[in-house]
Amino acid sequence: MNVRLLLLLSAVLLGATACTQVPQWTLFYVADQDKMPEGALAPHIAGYYEQLEQCLAKGAGMVKLSQSGKGSYKCGYECKDDQTGDVQCARFERVPAL
């Protein structure tokens, strides 16, 4: 096998695996409410992020840009489909109230 071809195949494989990294944090957001409602979280999914800081920043930005200036968000770590139409997360993080 040609050395150049081997290097090209290696570069393609490395590039492909870098693009398939699974995000670890899920943003849950509710507009116009100061508190996240009880019950299913799946309808409130607003994005997926690799880092907690990205998730929290996006949630804060969504609240800031909302028409009412209100909103509630939290970030769930390693959330999975629970086969009942909702998600379960290993843990949650949210910004403490000021």
Image (tube, rainbow, N blue to C red):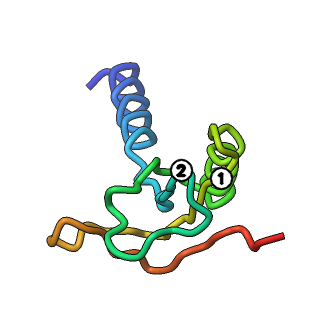
Query: Within 10 Å of the Cα at label 1, are there few (<14), some (14-19), or many (20+) other Cα atoms?
Result: some
Amino acid type for the residue under numbered disc 2: Ala
Q: Which residue is mark 2?
A: 31
Residue 70 position within the rendered picture, expressed as x and y whole percent measured from the top left: 65, 52
Q: Quadrant of the C terminus?
A: bottom right
Q: Is residue 36 placed above or below 30 in the rendered structure? A: below
Q: Which is nearer the N-term, disc 2 or disc 1?
A: 2
* Residue at image location 26% in from the left, 68% down from the top: 86
Residue at label 1?
70
Classify mark 2: residues with Cα within 10 Å, few (<14), some (14-19) or many (20+).
some
- Please state the horizontal and vertical placement of residue 9, each as a whole percent of the image: 33, 28
Image coordinates for residue 60, horizontal then vertical, percent: 69, 51
Badges 2 and 1: C-beta atoms under 8 Å apart?
yes
Q: Secondary structure at mark 2?
A: strand
Up-down: is 80 above or below 15?
below
Q: Residue furthest bottom?
A: 90
In-image side of 38 versus 93 (left or right): left
Residue type of the residue flagged with mark 1 = Lys
| Location of residue 82 by image quarter | bottom left
